[in-house]
Image: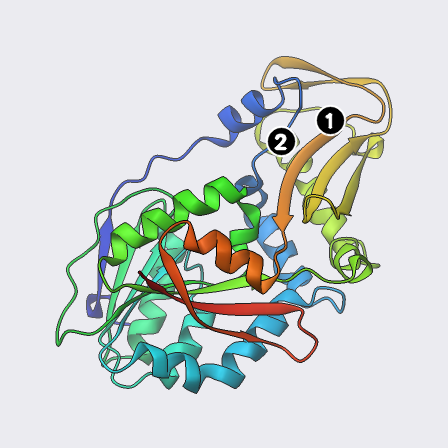
Amino acid sequence: MRDEARFAFLDLAPGEESFRDGVLHGLSGSRKAIPCKFFYDERGSALFERICGLPEYYLTRTEIAILEENADEITAQMGAYSRIIEFGSGASHKARILLQALDRPIAYVAVDISREHLREAAAALAEDFPEVAIIAVCADYTSAFASPSLPGPTGKRVGFFPGSTIGNFEPETVLRFLANCAHILGPGGEMVIGVDLKKDSRILEAAYNDRAGVTALFNLNLFERINRELDGDLDLDFFEHFAFYSESKGRIEIYIRSLADQQATIAGRRFNFAAGELIHTEYSYKYSVAEFRELAAGAGFRPVDTWTDPRELFSIHYFRLR
């Protein structure tokens, strides 16, 4: 049995926009949109796990391969007695690769907004890495939060943000996020970030339009969730998944497209959808190595090293605060 006393749990009571408020606000605008954070109910999370294993979806397996192949070089930059702070830690699968390769790591701080998932992941890490101080912080990692005190001896504070989630942010939001990370890490802080690279649009579009249709199910699950949780009557036979790569903007754009002029009731409110109307659900920005380095420099981060796979599909960046 896991001894949950071996890790610290800090609940900062993060405020979270309710699904109802997010949907009603997002569908009331002139350009309809639903925040992508609402993808991950129980069914959505299960569908995303399936996406990660699809042949077209290169991102997860490629990033893990880069981490595993270059773990010694990455952790050599971190040095002995380092403390990792992972923003949006989830199940902490990728952090395990670094913890196993690090020289006498002192602490691992997992920051996530999902309390129970966070607690379970921290308990598992505490069991597998008893020599490391495991600190779980329930907080919105995209906003400022109080950094917990970390044990000695003194080592580097290194932020960790894998998974290409950085691509879901607009570039100006990336700058705000990185500036917030810099504040939390403090002087001399460093950062490891996973970034999806620009590449042939056919590879990109296939990753978000898989032949098995799992990504379509994942996207449309937002509307199924509205029907389940908000007493909606959206007819899913008249909506479809729509995703494409915008070369000019350097991003995958994901929408739900209405196939007819129609109406639906959601939480007691009536909404109109025009034939061909797009409801935005997610952006996924892609960068060249040089582009992302330039963007990070705007938040005070200097590039130290970058690792990619042989096909240059994905990148892992190491930055140091100026």
* 145 in relation to 310, above or below: above
Which residue appears at 56% of the width and 62% of the height? 290
Q: What residue type is labelled 1?
A: Leu
Q: Specify the color scheme.
A: rainbow
Label 2 – label 1 distance at C-alpha: 8 Å
Q: In this view, does 20 lie above or below 43?
A: above
Of 282 and 137, which appears nearest the observer? 282
Residue 62 placed where, x, y %? 62, 73
Residue appearing at x 32%, y 46% in the figure: 139
Q: Residues within 10 Å of mark 2 (few under 14, many from 20)?
A: some
Q: Residues within 10 Å of mark 1 (few under 14, many from 20)?
A: some
Residue 32 position, x and y percent, is 66, 25
Nearer to us in this view, 105 or 45: 105
Residue ID for mark 1 = 234
Q: Nearer the viewer, residue 93 or 306?
A: 306
Residue 243 appears at what percent x and percent y?
76, 45
Query: Viewed as shown, does residue 112 lie left or right of 284?
Result: left
Q: How many labels does the image show?
A: 2
Q: Is mark 2 on a helix, strand or loop?
A: helix
Sequence-first tag of 2 and 1:
2
Figure quadrant of residue 56: bottom right
Q: Dot 2 corresponds to which residue?
A: 226
Q: Is residue 115 above or below residue 136?
A: above
Which residue is at 69% across, 15% downward?
271
